[in-house]
Image (spheres, rainbow, N blue to C red):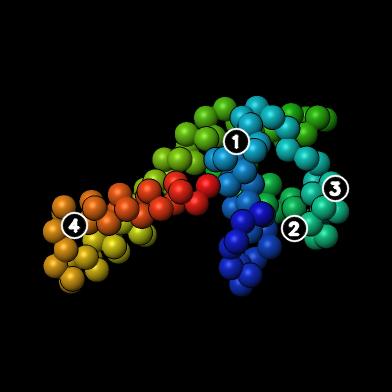
Amino acid sequence: MNCLSESLPIYIRMVEGIKDAILMNKIKEDSQLPSTTYLAKEYAINIATVNKAINVLVDQDLVYKKRGIGMFIKKGAVNKLKKERRETFKERYVAATLREAKKLNYSVEELQKLVKEAFEEMQNEK
């Protein structure tokens, strides 16, 4: 699971954790998700909560069910999630950053330099 706010419902945190695992290739497309019973025991939560999370993933067209076998990650899930996350990233972070940069009178060149420096710092942390 990721570091989502504890104030979010457990099933939403589970959904986002599974989405993160798909994006990071920890769960591959066409691979089977662990059973709802296993997930309920693993996370010490009610099986109804797990089912609610799985249903959200089905509704978002990221997971499908094979009768009698289990739940699987749909082909194309990674690309779909990347597209959604990139749009969210642009709206939530890039736009907000640019509004603040405008207030501080940053030039495009200065912003590019800041981003490059921050990126290099992150690369060095690995």
Image vertical order of residue 34 relative to residue 75, above or below: below
| Count of marks, rendered view | 4
Up-down relation of residue 109 to residue 82 (above or below): below
Q: Please give the label number shown on residue 37.
A: 3
In primary-sequence order, the first of circles 4 and 2 is 2
Residue corresponding to mark 1 = 25
Q: Secondary structure at mark 4?
A: helix
How many C-alpha atoms fall within 10 Å of the one at disc 3: few (<14), some, or many (≥20)?
some
**Could you tell me if the residues under marks 1 and 3 are in contact, i.e. CB atoms within 8 Å?**
no
Is any atom of residue 50 visible in this view? yes
Residue 114, position in %: x, y? Answer: 27, 56
- Give the image quarter of residue 63: top right
Mark 2 or 3, nearer chain start? 3
The amino acid sitting under disc 2 is Thr
- Left or right side of 31 for 97: left
First along the sequence among labels 1 and 3: 1
Q: CA distance from mark 2 to mark 3?
A: 11 Å
**Of the image marks 4 and 3, the number of the one nearer the N terminus:** 3
Distance (Cα) linking label 4 and label 2: 47 Å
Which residue was labeled with disc 4? 110
The CA span between labels 4 and 1 is 34 Å
Rounded to the nearest whole Å, what is the CA distance between mark 4 and mark 3? Answer: 52 Å
Residue shown at the point (61%, 30%) measured from the top left? 29
Residue 48: x and y, percent?
Answer: 78, 56
Tell me the number on the disc at residue 49.
2
In this picture, is 54 found above or below 96?
Answer: above
In depth, the one of 89 and 45 nearer the eye is 89
Q: To which quarter of the image does residue 26 belong? A: top right
